[in-house]
Image (cartoon, rainbow, N blue to C red):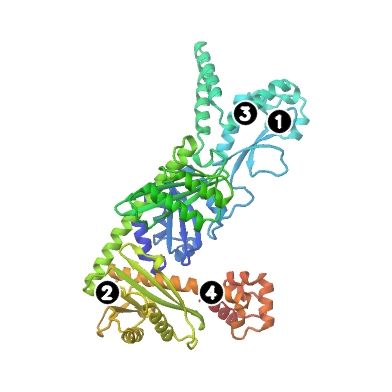
Amino acid sequence: MNENARPHIEKILANMTSLPGVYRMYGKDGELLYVGKAKNLKNRVSSYFVKTLDHPKTQALVARIYDIQTLVVRSETEALLLEQNLIKLHHPPYNIMLRDDKSYVYIFVSADKPYPRLASGRGKGKHQVGKFFGPYPSAYTARDTLVVLQKLFNVRSCENSFFANRTRPCLQYQIKRCSAPCVGFISPEDYKADVDNSIRFLQGDTKELNQELIAKMEAAAETLEFEKAVFYRDRMALLRDVQSQQAIYKLKGEADILSIAYQAGVTCVQIMHVRNGKMLGGKSYFPDMLSDDLGQMLADFIANFYFQVADEIPAELIVNLEVADRKELEAALSQHFGKKIQIKSKVRETRAEWLELAQMNVQHAIQGKLANHIELNERFHQLEQVVDRPVDRIECFDISHTMGEDTVASCVVFDSGGARKRDYRQFSIHDIQAGDDYAAMRQALTRRYKKALLPDLLLIDGGKGQLHMAMEVMQELGLDAFMVGVSKGEGRKPGLETLHFTDGSKIQLPEDHKALHLIQQVRDEAHRFAITKHRAKRDKKRGSSVLEVIPGLGPKRRRDLLTHFGGIQGVLKASERDLQLVPGLGSVMARMIYKVLHE
């Protein structure tokens, strides 16, 4: 595990649920690394962080994890299907990619006349003409369903080449799984009725079929044919089992499902997305809203989300309670997106199951948030003990640049509720000597506090030098700020940081001290925000010219690089070892290129 992420990961594991679900592992810059499923989320995810990991790929994955998010479901089957949806949607680098729909199993009813065939297989073959049913969670389930169909309706499953050359019935007829249409033992009309019943079965229209089985079972029992009665009883049980499909795949269509909940000062909205009948996962939001009416809060959230964040909207929004001014909101959304939008709070059957899933997840998310609040409050409390003063708002600055180019200063803000991202600020630094971090910090602090109020604690990422520079800025501005400098320890190892105070004193907190964990959390967020904004600015400005600032990399080598990797995006994704494979580049230049592009 990355040492910087250890406190955050340990907190997540401590509060993780034991329900089944899907977990998503993210890297330092928010990139999705891996999607997995679990019968017990807590046990499964915790297993990644034991000391006995042997597989190199798993070790490499764990070393890159900075965050873990979970999505709870009601069964392992739902977890499997949702996991596959997310893998196919996001292509995480540590998942085994299954392409061309081969991760799903379908049952196929051919269009052959007058005797169609039934078959199961992975993927929808483009050369096949007919109807596909599924996908099924596993090949076993699909094959089992196919066997049931054969036993119930005796529809053939053989290949056309085999069917066309039969002169007598095969073994399938002998074991009563086929009506032998190959040799004319059944009329096309009767066979069509069996095929139609098979399609009804696959579509879930099993009520009448179940009644027929009950009648046959009772008739067999009355005539003392107990073996046949047991056969029909088992077929009824299997029929119910294979047709109890999960909510994730029971209905075609598109919808967003939103569930809102409030508890102990925390409001959460869970959004789950269904597209083409498939559940594609969801996300929890914790809006900062000033209202006591959940219906009004949900209406405000829907408006903000779909007008400002989302670039598309399905025809249906399914919500867990009646939203305020529903008709007006529907009309506004319909006008904005150019199609009719409906918001529904009273739903049944499959939609009710989707809504239940969203409500499960919103409760799970809000419990996790509350646990985080308790931990965060304790961290703030212990920090107040260390600095001997009340602290409700912390601001921290960080500087990011590439060899002095496009310098960016970030300011992040934390309070007792966590990160206040809407208060974050970014400063583009100008008119300083390239690479002068002191001058960059001076400019950022001056621009920030000429207008903004001082926080309770201003964290300066650096030692005595940076802290003295910040003190000079505050003196020039005529401000009395409480500041603490944070210098890294030997080898920049987390847990060895030293806190420097303006009176010249300094302390080093124990590695497990919660006040230190809070300081590390704020500082790491400042670094993340600065480097993310810097890279976006740099890449937008330079595009492919990113290579032009690398010393010793002339036009020919730049052209060779771009040709080898197919463009600048390929170069940016390449590892140091990949760069060494470019003819004429060498290990030293490869290391230089990688360092400039990524560090």
Position of residue 314 in the picture relative to residue 504 (left or right): right
Q: Secondary structure at mark 3?
A: helix
| Residue 2 image point, x, y percent | 42, 67
In terms of image quadrants, where is residue 90?
bottom right
Position of residue 104 in the picture relative to residue 424 (left or right): right
| Residue 404 image point, x, y percent | 50, 83
Pointer 2 or 4: first along the chain: 2
| Residue 175 image point, x, y percent | 63, 24
Amino acid under label 3? Ser
Amino acid under label 4? Lys
Q: Nearer the viewer, residue 216 or 209?
A: 209
Real-space CA distance between mark 1 and mark 4, rounded to the nearest whole angstrom? 60 Å
Q: Give the labeled residue for mark 3.
A: 198
Position of residue 487 in the picture relative to residue 85 (left or right): left
Q: Give the labeled residue for mark 1.
A: 116
Q: Nearer the viewer, residue 61 or 573?
A: 573
Name the residue: 54% across, 17% down.
216
Amino acid under label 2? Leu
Examine the rendered structure and indicate whether residue 445 appears above or below residue 94: below
Label 2 crowd (10 A; few <14 / some 14-19 / many >=20): some
Depth check, mark 1 against mark 4: the one in front is 4
In terms of image quadrants, where is residue 496?
bottom left
Pointer 3 or 1: first along the chain: 1
